[in-house]
Amino acid sequence: MTLGHAVLVSPPIATARPPRLSGLAILFALVLMLVSPASPATQPASGATANWQWPVAAPHPIAKPFIAPETKYSAGHRGIDMSAPDGAVVTAPTDGVVSFAGFVVDRPVLSIRHSGGLVSSYEPVATELAEGAVVTRGRPIGVLVAGHCAASCLHFGVRLDGEYVSPLNYLGGIERSILLPTRSL
């Protein structure tokens, strides 16, 4: 037995774990985010703009809301239907360029390309505008005709980068979501 040599045994290698935050620390972080000046609750929704206006005169009750489809090809209601009388003047919600004016199946449809990857569509709307026409916010773009709802209504749809989104995102009709704690402190 030799006592002059020591054998070093290293402890097993420990795997590094990220530090865990307690539920209270997470809740505190969420509260700070909600009350900070840069809080999402004080900022416009993604893509929302303050310069959009309703395409028909008030009142403009919603006869059928936007219903997002589960998938790109699923059933849904890709816009909102606003009650309005036949012959109502339809105006541009914001500046843009006409990207389509014609018939889809048996209904007159008008589509306008706006900045930021947005396209708005209106049906059934009779118009004298042609593709390429420049439109400005609040100016007449056509007249509502019968054909979409049992009672007269305007179907108004909005696409963002090719995907349908609720037009209320741009008209200010959706309240902001607020995160609330799931349990009391």
Image (cartoon, rainbow, N blue to C red):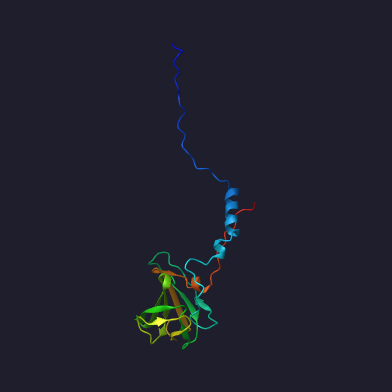
Residue 153's spot in the image, x, y percent?
47, 82
Of 105 and 40, nearer the camera is: 40
The residue positioned 40% from the left and 78% from the top of the image is 112
Residue 47's spot in the image, x, y percent?
47, 68
The residue positioned 45% from the left and 26% from the top of the image is 10
Of 137 and 141, nearer the camera is: 137
**Quarter of the image with the N terminus in it:** top left
Residue 181 in view, yes or no: no
Which residue is at the far top? 1
In the displayed structure image, the side of residue 50 where residue 98 appears, left or right = left
Which residue is at the far right? 185
In the displayed structure image, the side of residue 79 where residue 102 appears, left or right = left
Q: Is residue 14 above or below residue 125?
A: above
Residue 114's spot in the image, x, y percent?
42, 74
Of 141 and 143, nearer the camera is: 141
Of 113 and 4, nearer the camera is: 4
Residue 69 in view, yes or no: yes
Residue 5's spot in the image, x, y percent?
44, 16
Circle count: 0
In the displayed structure image, the side of residue 107 where residue 64 appears, left or right = right
Quadrant in which residue 123 is drawn: bottom left
